[in-house]
Amino acid sequence: MTDKTHDAKPSRRQFLAGAAAVGAGAVAGGSASAATPDPLITQVQDWASGLGDGVDATPYGLPIQYESDVVRRNVEWLTADTISSINFTPIHALDGTITPQGCAFERHHSGAIELRKEDYRLMINGLVDTPLVFTYADLERFPRENRVYFCECAANSGMEWAGAQLNGAQFTHGMIHNMEYSGVSLRTLLEEAGVKPEGKWVYVEGADASSNGRSIPLEKAMDDVLVAFKANGEALRKEHGYPVRLVVPGWEGNMWVKWLRRVEVMDQPVESREETSKYTDTLANGVSRKWTWEMDAKSVVTSPSPQAPITHGPGPLVITGLAWSGRGAIAGVDVSLDGGKNWQEARLAAPGTDKALTRFYLDINWDGSEMLLQSRARDTSGYVQPTKAQLREVRGLNSIYHNNAIQTWWVKANGEAENVEVS
Ligand SMILES: Nc1nc2c(c(=O)[nH]1)N[C@H]1C(S)=C(S)[C@@H](COP(=O)(O)O)O[C@H]1N2
Ligand SMILES: [Mo]
């Protein structure tokens, strides 16, 4: 077969291709143009002159070396020791909504443990008709569900309460991941044991030394909580609770107990360390709010952002970010280019779904001038993401957890971005 574009005489097709290249050049400010031959187009490259790698070079695939900067990172002063640790999802470098397990943030109170399926046991006891112990193989025989949910640590954005501090969406908003979980509804297992009428709470704990025990009202436990063993189709990674973790949709990450070992049905909450001295919010008057389970609606522009600067000149610019709500689905996202004075509605990549990340885009014709970039999420309950000032009015300045305020990036004319606050 002859390729007409190789003829000396320009064909219509060649003209169109040339025009497209010029057009693309104008859009991206790139080097492609019909006038200057591009060796990447005109010359046979090394990778086309021989064989590539065989299929079994890496039995379990890893990202290509050129993507080696798309990794979890930590903030040194936050991670004093390795067993009480936190790292952050590189949300500035991801697209879509699903977080690959390999770069999903981790938070451990006493380190990630290695637990074999054979050694796994889940006990349901307390106010039940029949206390039960399940093996991993037992869990696999109950009807399964598949659901996508976000998991956000209550401390996400916590370092930003007092002022703009960390320079990057990964650090300000990266204590979040969003995966498709496969598992058994906790309701199914509780019904198997038979909850006694006095049972009003469950106390859930993990097999690690910290146990990370939390009390959950029975109403929630019987609603959408999952006992999950797969994430994004494959087994949970060790760091996310292999072989079994609890998924508590929309509620603070601390309740998503990893290496789940026991569910005790109780008539009252335990008031454990994790739900009293930690994960509570102290208000301006010194009184702490008792329970803050639901994660309020929140959003962030992931690009452009400090770690994802604009690398081209004026013209078409894709602004994108993530939005989520623990109270339902995202109904809409507004974006401001001028620090919240004017707002325009972003395009949702797909309609928001219950308690899961939603991707938004705003495709603009950037004039090359600086911007104060913000996003504002709205959820199906009618709630609108607040400004920092509005949040501080209600919550004061003592809080560490549950900061869902609007984030501002100062995008400069040279495309670089910085974490700032507007008043
Ligand atoms: N057993 C156990 N479960 C746990 C924890 C823990 O240290 N031990 N950390 C909790 C906290 S504070 C958060 S934010 C989430 C983090 O889940 P990830 O490590 O999968 O991101 O797990 C929660 N579940
Ligand atoms: Mo957390």
Image (cartoon, rainbow, N blue to C red):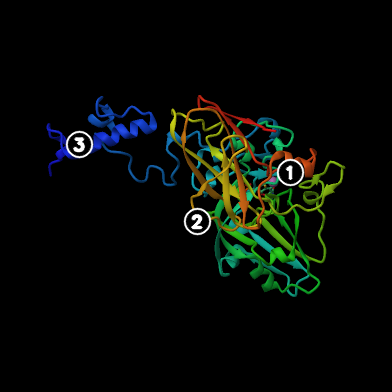
Q: Position of residue 142 (x, y in %)?
A: 58, 69
Does the Cβ of the disc 3 residue fall within 8 Å of ligand 1? no
Query: Element under label 2?
Result: loop
Please tell me whether residue 123 is drawn above or below residue 41 in the rendered image.
Answer: below
Q: Residue tagged by mark 1?
A: 401
Q: Residue tagged by mark 2?
A: 233
Amino acid tagged 1: Tyr
Residue 288 visible in this rendered orientation of the protein: yes
Amino acid tagged 2: Gly
Q: Is residue 163 left or right of residue 328?
A: right
Which callout, 1 or 3, points to the residue nearer the camera?
A: 3
Q: Is residue 258 left or right of residue 302?
A: right
Q: Position of residue 177 (x, y in %)?
A: 58, 47
3D distance between C-alphas at marks 3 and 2:
45 Å
- Front residue (pair 244, 370): 370
**Which comes sooner in the sequence, label 1 or label 3?**
3
Q: Residues within 10 Å of mark 3 (few under 14, many from 20)?
A: some
Does the Cβ of the disc 2 residue fall within 8 Å of ligand 1? no
User: Which numbered marker is on residue 24?
Assistant: none
Tags 3 and 2 touching, CB below 8 Å? no
Which callout, 2 or 1, points to the residue nearer the camera?
A: 1
- Front residue (pair 118, 354): 354
Q: Quadrant of residue 56?
A: top left
